[in-house]
Structure formats: C-alpha cells, structure tokens
Image: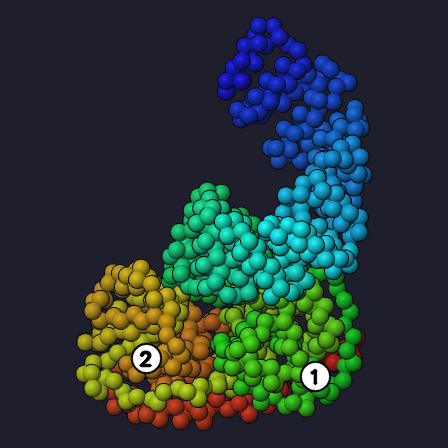
Amino acid sequence: MEARAVLEAAVAAGDHSPVTQLNLALAEERCGDADAARRRIEKVAAEVPGWDEPLLRLAESLRWSGEWPAAEQAYRRTLELNPLRYEALLALGAGLVARGRAAEALLFLVQACECEPQRFEAWHALGLAQLAVGNAVPAEAALARACQAAPDRLDVAQQRAEAAIAAGAAEAELARLEAQACTRPLDPFPRRVQAHLLALLGRMTDALDMLEAAAAIAPADAGCAAALGHALAGMERTSEAEAALRRALALDPSSQQTRADLATVLIRHLHFPEAETLLRGLIEEIGPQGLLLSNLATALVGQGRQEEAITAARRATEVAPDAIQPWRTLTAVLPYSASAEDHAAAARACARRYPRGSRVSLFRKPDPDRPLRVGLLSNALRTHPVGWLTLAAWEALDRAAFDLVCLGPRSPSDVFAHRFAARASEWHDLAGYDDESAAALCRTLEIDVLVDLGGHGEAGRLGVLARRAAPVQVKWVGSQIGTTGLPETDWFVTDRWETPPECADLYGERLLILPDGYVCYGPPSSAPDVSPLPALTNGSVTFGCFNNLAKITPEVIQSWAAILASVPGSKLVCKAPQFDQASVVESVKARLAAAGVDRRRVTLRGASDHRTHLTAYADVDLALDPFPYSGGLSTCEALWMGVPTVTLPGRSFASRHTLSHQENAGLSGWAAGSREQYVALAVARASELDELAALRAGLRAQVAASPLCDASRFGRSLGGALRNAWQAWCTDRQDC
C-alpha cells in the first residue's frame, strides 16, 4: 500500500515515465486491483510499442489470474519483440508443458536454456517436457543440468531419477548416487534420492533401508522423518509410520503434507476423531481439496456419521470432478446410508474416470475346455474377510482345470497367505506396479480369467481391469457392495438371495449366479465351543452387534431403541475396534441415550484377538444386523457361535449379505421387510427362549453341514461358473 501511494504521488507530480507507470501497475496488482494494473500496462505498451517489458508484465498478470489463453498470446507477442527474452521463453514453455502441450514447449525451453544456461528453472522445465514427449535420454541430461544448477533441490533430483529409469539408466543412476553418498556420508540427500529411485523400481525394502539411513544421519530433519513415515505407510507398517510421522510433525508442526500423511495413517488405525481434527485443520488452511475431503469422508463414516461422510465425499467430487479418488470414496461410503440406485450411479461415474491406457488385443485360443489360468487380484490374500470367505473355495477348485496366480502383496508370516501360496502356482507382488504395468503383467502371464477381490476399496485395483488385463474379468468378494460400474468387468459372482430378479437392473455386469450362496465360509479350527443361551441364566435377553461402527446409522439406533424398550430388562452389546477410544464410546452412548436407551443397558467393547472376539458371543442371545449395510463375515461368525441374526435386506448387494448367509445355512425366517417388521421380529424372537436355546445348541452342526461351509461343493460350483464365463467368451470369439 505504501509503495502504491508513493508511486501515485509521483505520477500526480508529473512523472509519467514508462518505468514509473509499470512499477505503479505492479503495486496495483499487489493490492488486488488487477483491472487497473492491466489498463495501465496496456497504455504503456501502446505508448512504447517496441518495448517488450509491458507485454511481459501483462502476460504475467494474466497468468497469475488464471487467464492462460490471453497470457499465452501476450507471451508470444513479447517474444515477437524480443525473441531472447528469458522470462517469456520459460513461462510460455512451462505453461505449455503444464497443459499437455510439451512438444510445442520444447523450442521455447531450449532457447531459454541457451539464453541463461546457469539458471536451473529452464533446464528443469526442459527435462519435464522431454520426459512428457518420451525423449528419456535428453530428459535425463536436462535434469542433470538442473541438478548442477540447483544441487539442493530434492524434487529435481528425484525427477532426474525418474528420467534415468525411463532412459534405461537406473543402475547407473543408483551407482552415481551411491558414490555421492560415500563422499557425503553425513548428508541424507543422496539416500533420499536413492530411496525414491528404488521405490519406483519396486524395491520397497531397499528403499526403506535408505530412508532409515537418512533418518539416522539427520535425526533432526523433519523431511527425512516424514519421508520414512510415508514409505512405512505405503508398506502397511502403520504403527511405525505413525511414530515416524509424529516425529516429523514435532520437528515441523507447520508441514501440511506431514499432517495429511498422519491423518491417512490414523484412519488406517481407525483413530478417526484425531484424523478428522487434522483434516479439518488442513481444509481450513488450504481450502477444500479432493483428497483431503475424501479422507475426511472416510474418517466421518468410521465414526458412524454416514450423512456427514456422504456430504464430504460429494463435495470432494465437486472440487476434483475428474479425479478418481473422490469418486472411489463416494462409492465406498454411499452403501452405509444411501439407496442402491445412488450407489450404482456413483459406481458408474467412478468407473468412467479410470484411464483405459493403450488397448491391447488379447489373443487366447478359444478352447472352451482347456485348463485355465485364473488371476486373484487383491491386497487381502491373507487373514482378512477375503481370506475367510474365499480361500476354502480356491483350495477346493480342481487343480487340473484351474491354475491360480496370486497378484498382490504377500504377508510372509500370515497363515492364510501361506495357504494361498500353497494353492497357487505363482505369486506376483504388485508393489511398484501402477495399473498400466500391472495389466501388462497379467497379459504377459497369460491370465485367462482375472478375479478382482478388491473393488473400489482403498487398495482396490479396478484400474487394472479397466485396461482389459484378461479376456474374462470377474468381480467377487472384497468391497463387493454393488456393481463395479466398470464395462470391463464382465461378470459378477452372486446368488439368488443377493441379486433376485427385481434387483438385476442395478448391475452392468452379467450375473454369475451360483446354485447356493455366493461365498464359502471356512470356520476357524480354534473357535471356542458354543456356550448355552445366556438369557437362561441371566434372566434377561442380550442383543448384540459385532459389526463395524460405520454400519450403525441413526435409523439403526432408533430401531434398537424400540427393541430394547419392548423387551424389559434387555441389554445391548456392541463390539468394534473403534470402541477402543473413549471419545467414540461416549459419542455412541450419547446417540443411544438421545434415542431413549439407558446407558447402563449398553456395553461397547473394542478390538481383541480373534478367539476372544468369538468368545464374546457367549454373552449374546441373538444378533441385530445393521442396515442398509448388513454383516458379512460377522454374520458367518455369529452363526458359527450359535447366534442367529435379525436382518433387514434392501435392494443393494451390501444390504443382503446376512440374508444370503443365513438362507444358505438353512436358517429362514430371520429377515424383515421393513423397519417396523425388523423391530417386531427381534422382539418376537427374544420371547422364544426355549426355541433360541435349542437352535443355538445345534446351529454350529447345521452350519457345518450346510452349503455355506461345504468347500468341495462350493469349489465345484465356482469352477463350473468360471468355466461357463470362459465358454461364453469362447462362443463370442467364434461368432465374430
């Protein structure tokens, strides 16, 4: 303001020189008066038509205000007057690169480098432009010059490493960095660049070693601690990641990236309230951004605040409409509260945003009866709901007819992972593979049928399917909450309860309807014995829900309150990992109290080991399913422990899991058609203690003998379904 006043006074005193006028325009720009500044610049340009400075100032003003087409024109006019004006060459070239016009940018950037060879900015922009057009060797050379000019710029050094990989010189770059590290043993910089290069090569363990070395060399360097935390989070070593990120934040509390990374790790630890606080602080500081809002939605739904989560996710799609993550988040949170139609629409919108990459013709001999290579695409081939509900089926699949290939991270100490590995002929860890390269790997492996077991979930890889990685692509389990919306997903494994004819219109995939249920539950051999019905000794009925808190909606709470009010002396036990946090316990108890439930009638239990978790069913007489997102594995476990579940299925796939599992286990009559019927059914069942006791005593044997746990039967059904899908593809090829 003071500079503007001084310059205005000079003009008023008669100083109308072009330099004074341009300086006043700059002061006006800084005061937010862009229109006045531009009028003044244009006046000077008209008065001194051969001078390039006014046009450059105009171009800069237009670029700063986001008016790129006009800025580009002004830069080009500047260069007509002065073809060697460095600032115009650099800004025009960098602007073209940012807008996907790298080929046009090359000439301007080469000239900028010739004008000012000692300046790193032009070499940096030139390297990025060369990389964008696929000229990897010149890109690496340009970025090397940028590194010489700015030896402390970590981002430039890391981009040079990326160019070295593209140029086929990764090992040479690693050797150069190692030599640099040896000459600078107390400098973490070379180790961090090495780590970046190793991570890009998929050598995550080696990358982590480098980052740990960098953090040890510079324990007071916030950047080193933050990079280590980020890498640990990527390897799902979340406890160590949290510790490293907290160290980084203590060293640099202002770091927005560290706070964002810590929020992500806290979400994985289910520490949703603290994550929410961090994310709201970031959004207040830097404004709404797609990724921050997406993570906020996840933190909110994890606390059982479904409508707030949906609002945040929808806002994320508005802020970043072309980005995939906001749509994936919206697709993930909608089933907890919204309609099946809303979810299907979001899934289709999400699917449209996956890049398709370069389409490759997949040649496979259309032999309908030959042995098939089946790829299992998942980050959860371990002790996880995916393992509990699919592994027994994969093990029962005819080995002569189906060769399995695991595609995803491998947990070396996990029992289920060992069983997956024993059944598969190959296992390929996809760490370091983007969707394009993962799809290319599937083609190289000659996968015939690719089964996605991740969906739109956090670590799902539907982008691999979008690139047509296999002739036949199938969705099964793993965030299987409804249609994928992806045209490249050919089939959707289901059953007659999950997708009755009246719900078929919700799916773009062809429905691969199995004769029994759509999953095969493999119960744990270490499960405790079924206990007697607790109501017989307690003198009152105890309802239970061991589902994720995200599924407990306000409507569920209102229904539970009505049930408890109708069953004198009854109690409610809920169990979820979030209940390890006192603030969450207090929040949920307050919501129940607001619905009229005496706090003394409610017990909320947190996480435990698996056997203790199952043992807790000894306190439960019957389970209450949440809606509209019903229990999956939790319902199977309740059945195994002798506890039936009252459920309220809707139209969505996610709402019908319990119906499918119980009907498949021969347990009918536990599904309601409305909230009123749900309440009435729970109340009625709670009054039938003799019947409940008898059912409980024989339920495990009934479930064990049912198709739900009959792996051999399910293996034949799954094999037949996959064969039918393959044969349909063969028929389509023959008809072409």
Q: Which residue is mark 2?
A: 616
Q: Is residue 180 visible from the viewing direction of this image?
A: yes
Q: Which residue is mark 1?
A: 372
Callout 2 secondary element: helix
State the residue at coordinates (75%, 64%): 359
Instruction: Tell me the quarter of the picture where residue 647 sits.
Output: bottom left
Q: Closer to the N terminus: mark 2 or mark 1?
A: 1
State the residue at coordinates (49%, 76%): 384
Q: Closer to the camera, 32 or 148? A: 148
| CA neighbours of label 2 inside 10 A, class few (<14), some (14 to 19), many (20+) | some
State the residue at coordinates (63%, 23%): 38
State the residue at coordinates (22%, 87%): 536
Q: At which x and y percent is residue 162? A: 70, 54
Q: At which x and y percent is residue 655? A: 44, 72
Q: Is residue 70 visible from the viewing direction of this image?
A: no
Amino acid type assigned to the residue bearing label 1 in the image: Leu
| CA neighbours of label 1 inside 10 A, class few (<14), some (14 to 19), many (20+) | many
Q: Closer to the camera, 264 or 114? A: 114
Residue 19 lies left or right of residue 547; in this view the side is right
Between label 2 and label 1, give the one nearer the viewer.
2
Residue 467 lies left or right of residue 310; in this view the side is right
Residue 83 lies left or right of residue 466; in this view the side is right
